Amino acid sequence: MRDNGHYLTVDSALARAEVLLASEDLASAENMAAHALRSHTAASPATEDRISHVRTQARILLVISRCRRRNDYKAGFDLMRDICNLYTSIGRRDEAVEVLRSEAQLIEKFGDTEIVSSYYALLLQILTELDDRETLTRIHLKAGNFVFNRGRYPESRAHYVAALKLARDNQFVRLEADAHLNMGNVHWAGGDYDEALQCYLQAEEHYSRIGEIRARGDVYNNVGAIYLYQGEYALVLEYFLKALNIRQEAGDWKRVAGSLLNIGNVYFHLGHEASAFEYYLQSKNLYERHDDRPGLAELLVNIGAVYERTNNRDLALQAYRKSVELRRECGLEALLATTLINIAIVHMNSGDYQSAVEHAQQALAKARENNDLRVQSYAIHCIGEAKMKSGERRAAREHLEQALEIRRRLGYRSGEAETLNAIAELEMIEDDPESALSTIDEALLTARELHEKPRELELLLKSARCREQCGRLREALDDHHKANELRTQIERDKNSQLLTNLQVAHQMEDMRRNKDGAHRRVQELEQEIGALETQRRALEARERDRSESLRVISHDLRKSLKNISDALRRQPESVETGRTTAAGKDNRHLAESIRQTGKVVAGLEELLIPPVATGDNGLDESDRIDTKQKKS
């Protein structure tokens, strides 16, 4: 028989431990859970239901695991393995998987990247042993997303490749589409845009097969973002509008706000800051209406960029600082680093190098907390540039070389060219033209491979100056010729692109106005229909009241007239010389009139409801034939 007293004690202690854990009192929660475990272990297994016994033990160990992993992740991981073994021992692998799945959603909130990655590795190992392929695929995707968001692209790629293989082999169509989408993101981050587009198109094909509309909107959004980066504004517009339409049809306000932000970015790149700002404000209204502070914080970074470009540096700093404030309120410390770098750049462009270094160092500390190597490289490069401009050459070289090493390790080639350019500038300041030339040649090779013409032009001009300092005048002249040709090409491309930009901006504005006009007309029609519907209901109500009144009057009148008619008919006729007297004739005439009047009153009820039209003009076929005959 079940020991009710024992179970009450264990259950109460376990419930109390869970409450303490939720309130972040970890020490008390672990002590209470340990008490529950001791009481539970002391129970005689012979008197217990084995499945219930093991489930209770697993719940207790889960509380202890969650308490310990805050300070000792390995101990927490070991207990997770014990928990899975317990569920497996009673043939409940599905419950083990469910626990692992819930833990995967909690784990990203704690610890640094290495610890979280280790936990995902444990989850993947256990899921492989359990042979739960669907959950294994999902966890590979989640683990890949986690390290991708921290700039660890090779690791994320490995997870996505594993997820893609599992999804293909087991025909998990939705998960295969997700894997293609994420692989596209990896290629995009590495600058391989053609491969990224191929992955996105494969993802779109799979989403279409299963009717996944919302995810298709995400694909279109990403494709548009690539074209935006490449300057293909007509294609940007096409895909961003596709994404916006899908998201509006789905009623997904959060993604709609994101699409509006992206269209604002198109205008920003086209050089139409006023129009960009208009779309940013539409997005801002949605975020504020739904009190989405994380979304608002992201938007403020874009608004700050508009202010910065238009030389409103005070307003730019105000927007960036508000973004930092919101992210701190929301506990999004991991996202602060990039905004702090933006603040540092504003200070550096204003000549306040000390403030630039301070904010870049804050960004670096945040990036290191999250082990985000890409953002670390941004911050270190920014510090190096600020140090160089303030005359601290040794410190500048240390930081720039450190940034270069990280960017090479990540395969971040555009960033590598940027840092090489800064190092070459430093070497020119140090009056070392030969070293500067070597660095410039390396940076030029990367810039040409990436088709970064403005950076190539800047490097060619530096190369010419260095060759002049070295006395290599013919080579310097060649560099100047190349620079002039490239400048002419850039100007020609710029003029062509300007025309395209203006055409695209005009198209976007026309589409926006047409859409706004159509939306207003729809609203007006809806209001008119609503007003007509209200009038119709009021008329029907009045008609029903009127019909009922006429019916009552008709009934009462017919009854009264019938009584009078009957009374008149019962009066005796006077016979005089074989003729009916005048009075008798008058009585019969009056009775007949009353009878006819009753028929008329009865007919009123049939006239209250108009006939229903059965043809084009309210007549059926026989009516139309008769009418034609009458007309003829």
Image: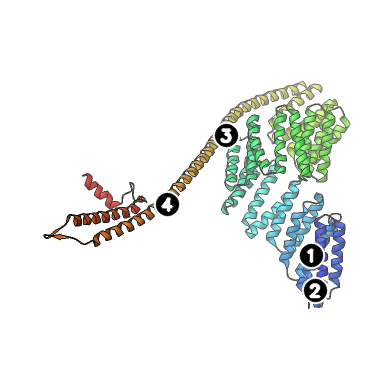
Image quadrant in which the N terminus is located: bottom right
| Mark identifier at residue 59 | 1
- Which residue position holds label 3? 508
Is 413 located above or below residue 350 in the figure? below
- Which residue position holds label 4? 544
> Which residue shows up at 57% across the image and 51% down it?
208
- x%, y% of residue 423? 81, 31
**Comes first in the chain, label 4 or label 1:** 1
- Which of discs 1 and 3 lies nearer the camera? The answer is 1
Separation of marks 1 and 3 at Cα, in angstroms: 57 Å
> Which residue shows up at 67% across the image and 38% down it?
284
Q: Are marks 3 and 4 in contact (CB under 8 Å)?
A: no
Q: Secondary structure at mark 3?
A: helix
Is 134 located above or below residue 240 in the figure? below
Separation of marks 3 and 4 at Cα, in angstroms: 53 Å
Separation of marks 2 and 4 at Cα, in angstroms: 69 Å
Circle 1: residue type: Arg
